[in-house]
Amino acid sequence: MSAMQAVILVGGEGTRLRPLTSRQPKPVITLVDRPFLVYMLEWLRGHGVTDVILSCGFEPTKVREALGDGAALGISLRYVVEPEPRGTAGALKFADEQVGLAERFLMLNGDVLTDVDIGAQLAQHEATGAVGTLGLVPVDDPSAYGLVLCDERHQVTGFLEKPAPSQLVGVDRYYISAGIYVLEHRVLDMIESGANVSIERTIWPALVGQGLHGSRAEGAYWMDIGTPERYLQGTFDILEGNVRTGVAERLGDGFLAVADDVEAIGRIVPPAVVGSGVKIAAGAHVGSLVVLGPGVSIGEGARVERSVVLDDVTVGAGAVLTDCIVAPGVSIAEGAVVRGGAVIGEGVRIGAGNVLAAGIKVFPDTELPPGAIKF
Ligand code: GDD
Ligand code: MG
């Protein structure tokens, strides 16, 4: 059997994750301890997919720097760069024109953290002779996704991208498209060359009743990490071991990974990942559900809980961080409070006594004088 091929779409701008994606494209922002896309590549390799094409909407310099040719991950990684973003179907067409896709291949949205069993989806695809098989996961609220309706033989009877409340009447369980597709090459014949075409709004609806099937992945983990709330939730789920990842191996039974050279006088409560060179001063409390990137320094009596604090951040004495994301190089002065889903961009300097909450987003390199913002 030849290796399965996958095309991963990574051309979106990741605007909903700003300011995390202001300097770093979504595919390579750090999730716990590695670039996001590494989770997808490790998952694919685990299912025997080793020929991967990254479909990029603009020059992916930073993605290339982080992932190279994939050799370190045991896969072959190729890059296809559209002259301008072509939409999800246009991007696929362009990739085929550039590299010639296989007779049967996987197509994946590049922002999902999952351990769905691709083998089961492929087996169903082969058994039914479908032209395309959409991986489906159950959700409570389908409004941000593509809602897929199927009959009892798993044939798709309706595809509604970002459904309005009125379109949900009479649907009792919501299955959405997980952004994991098995496709036959002939689907490409339906996509106009050189045009901007959405696969969700044009191709799936056209294939309803024409050999499009759905494959329900019950019990698997699945999360689109494309918003700060879901990025944090994905982090917590990795730390708790709710999703099978390489991080779980690092964490082990104690749900704790602390680099050898960490200097911690204060307390660390698992689950937590603490990177190389981190310093935690006396009386500080780190955890649970915390990631401290390499080079982070936590001051005396500071408290960090349910948060991601990336590389080289300094947290002053007595500062309190809860439910927040702090990008690399930020400095947080003593007594500042960051909580409530706040996202702090690279290089921001937060003066003493600021209180940042309620989902506030602070863009890179902003300087907040002492006490400037208090909620
Ligand atoms: N190459 C390329 N070119 N990639 C693109 C383009 C483009 O023009 N536009 C979007 N992408 C990539 C994004 O980077 C992302 O990985 C993927 O296509 C999906 O785009 P999103 O912007 O994340 O879409 P969404 O999350 O709102 O909805 C999609 O994903 C849901 C599951 O997470 C849809 O496919 C839904 O049907 C689905 O339920
Ligand atoms: Mg998405």
Image (cartoon, rainbow, N blue to C red):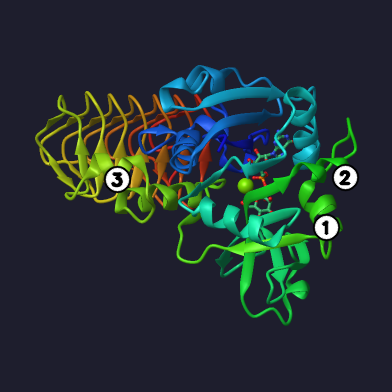
The answer, for residue 127, to whether it is visible in the render is yes
Q: Residue at x 67, y 28 (%)?
A: 56
Where does the image place residue 308, in percent across and percent down from the top left?
A: 36, 41
Residue 88 at x, y percent in the picture: 75, 41
Disc 1 designates what residue?
Answer: 207
Query: Where is residue 196, by image quadrant?
Result: top right
Residue drawn at (28%, 40%) of the image: 335
First-in-chain label (1 vs 2): 2
Front position in the image: 355 or 255: 255
Q: Earlier in the sequence, mark 2 or mark 3?
A: 2
Q: Residues within 10 Å of mark 1 (few under 14, many from 20)?
A: some
Q: Is residue 317 left or right of residue 165?
A: left
Dot 3 amino acid type: Ala
Residue 363 percent location from the top left of the image? 54, 32
Q: Given this view, does label 2 or label 3 mark the residue nearer the observer? A: 2
Mark sitting earlier along the chain (3/1) = 1
Q: Which mark is residue 190?
A: 2
> Rounded to the nearest whole Å, what is the CA distance between mark 3 and mark 1?
39 Å
Residue type at tag 2: Met
On-image quarter of the N terminus: top right
Q: Secondary structure at mark 1?
A: helix
Ligand 1 visible in quadrant: top right
Q: Which label belongs to residue 248?
A: 3
- The residue positioned 35% from the left and 45% from the top of the image is 307
